[in-house]
């Protein structure tokens, strides 16, 4: 198996020399800087997923909605399993600033305060995402092409939550090979600022959170198709460019929205990608794990074991790498999953069912971490 096959499993490659060069690239911005200490937890999580994860120096977390924090089932699951939470929606630009000039932090503050009270780390998700730019900001950016508007947003969010957040998804989903030859998504930012917007975003984020881990977060990197192979390759090329230029990037978020409709996981493609990210000196976090079912008409037990098996197969690949430092699911409970809203019916792709009964998926995460 050569490097070409490993990275994309199919159709393109990064020359070995190019990647070897990456691992030697300047790491000054991370050297000697350790992430902010985790708040001390007052809670014993001895049998849960986070305690299993911590045995190999990792963490386990999940995405939460501010309103969901009143649910005693969620609180119990967080207590049992998680040492980190991610705001599913509350930190996005359009959630914080739906209209020009006025920010409302109440929902995000609730999530941050909850994290503080319960000794949970908080992921900063996400500063820049093409799907969550409020209309007023999109207009302003297109009209003025002034980076300052983006940086001001970063400043408002990052300074407010700096003491709690040790990991920021600075850019979310910048890759789209179908948009143009560079493979970068033709989003509002690319149109206004050109491809350098990505490094500007990292430099701006670095100003306000020099010690936190700053990451790019991406989806569609798991399956055996030319398209996903192309996405893996484009991501690696982007990371390589950023590292060569000394941009303050510390890691990669792999969203990992697994999907049983897409066929087989590309074992070699995933392995090669994580290995090459590792060689660049970057950390990896699985940020949004869940599983889309292919057939919701099967008996429950069968559905749950298909989901659990896919989860286990994926985690067994990525957890071979010690620099995969955290696993996060995109919610804990099928009843509140974004996939339910997307598909218009229940999808059993999270660790607990809608009545907070633990499912096989939870066991397989536990076993993979153990
Ligand atoms: C989704 C949330 O789950 C939804 O509730 C919201 O309406 C839209 O965003 N990739 C991401 C997440 O990075 O932020 C998205 O979350 C799901 C896809």
Image (tube, helix red, strand yellow):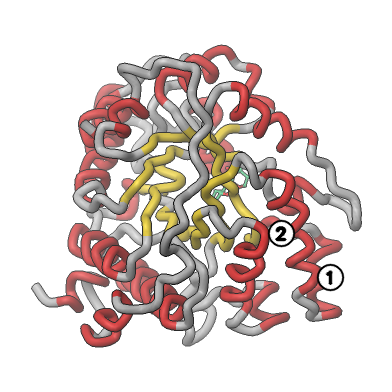
- Residue 349 placement: quadrant: top left
- Residue 108 placement: quadrant: top right
Instruction: Please name the residue that numbered disc 2 is placed on.
Output: 154
Which residue is drawn at the image coordinates 43% and 21% (left, top)?
Answer: 353
350 left or right of 186? left
Q: Position of residue 333 (x, y in %)?
A: 48, 26
- Give 250 or 70, whichever is nearer the viewer: 250
Q: Position of residue 148 (x, y in %)?
A: 79, 72
Query: Along the polypeptide, which appears first: circle 1 or circle 2?
Result: 1
Q: Position of residue 172 (x, y in %)?
A: 56, 60
Q: What secondary structure is marked by label 2?
A: helix
Please tell me the numbered disc located at residue 196.
none
Which residue is drawn at the image coordinates 58% and 44% (left, top)?
Answer: 165
Label 1, residues with CA under 10 Å away: few <14, some 14-19, many ≥20: few
Image quadrant occupied by the N terminus? bottom left
Which residue is drawn at the image coordinates 30% and 36% (left, top)?
Answer: 307
Q: CA distance from mark 1 to mark 2?
A: 18 Å
- Give 105 or 28, whichever is nearer the viewer: 28
Which residue is drawn at the image coordinates 77% and 53% (left, top)?
Answer: 156
Instruction: Please name the residue that numbered disc 1 is placed on.
Output: 139
Q: Is mark 1 within 8 Å of ligand 1?
A: no
26 left or right of 304? right
Q: Relative to 85, is 40 above or below?
A: above
Is residue 12 among the parts visible in the rendering? no
- Give 108 or 323, whichever is nearer the viewer: 323
């Amino acid at each position: 198996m050569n490097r070409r096959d490993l990275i994309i499993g199919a159709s393109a490659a990064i020359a070995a020399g190019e990647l070897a060069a990456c691992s030697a690239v300047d790491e000054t911005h991370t050297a000697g800087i350790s992430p902010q200490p985790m708040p001390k937890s007052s809670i014993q999580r001895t049998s849960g997923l986070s305690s299993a994860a911590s045995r190999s120096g990792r963490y386990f977390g999940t995405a939460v909605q501010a309103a969901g924090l009143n649910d005693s089932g969620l609180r119990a699951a967080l207590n049992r399993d998680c040492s980190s939470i991610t705001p599913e929606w509350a930190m996005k630009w359009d959630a914080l600033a739906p209209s020009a000039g006025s920010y409302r932090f109440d929902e995000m503050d609730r999530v941050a305060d909850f994290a503080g009270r319960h000794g949970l780390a908080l992921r900063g998700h996400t500063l820049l995402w093409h799907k969550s730019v409020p209309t007023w900001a999109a207009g302003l950016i297109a009209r003025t092409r002034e980076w300052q508007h983006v940086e001001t947003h970063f400043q408002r969010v990052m300074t407010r939550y700096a003491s709690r957040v040790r990991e920021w998804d600075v850019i979310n989903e910048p890759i789209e090979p179908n948009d143009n030859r560079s493979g970068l998504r033709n989003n509002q930012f690319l149109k206004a600022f050109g491809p350098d917007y990505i490094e500007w975003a990292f430099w701006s984020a670095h100003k306000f959170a020099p010690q936190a881990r700053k990451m790019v977060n991406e989806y569609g990197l798991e399956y055996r198709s030319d398209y996903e192979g192309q996405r893996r390759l484009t991501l690696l090329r982007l990371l390589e460019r950023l590292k060569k230029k000394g941009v303050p990037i510390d890691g990669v978020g792999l969203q990992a929205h697994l999907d049983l409709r897409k066929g087989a996981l590309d074992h070699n493609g995933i392995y090669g990608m994580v290995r090459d990210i590792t060689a660049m000196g970057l950390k990896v976090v699985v940020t949004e794990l869940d599983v889309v079912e292919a057939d919701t008409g099967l008996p429950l037990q069968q559905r749950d074991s298909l989901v659990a098996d896919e989860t286990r197969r994926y985690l067994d690949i990525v957890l071979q790498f010690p620099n995969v430092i955290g696993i996060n699911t995109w919610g804990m409970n099928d009843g509140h999953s974004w996939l339910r809203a997307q598909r218009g019916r229940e999808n059993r792709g999270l660790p607990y069912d809608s009545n907070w009964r633990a499912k096989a998926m939870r066991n397989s995460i536990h076993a993979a971490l153990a």
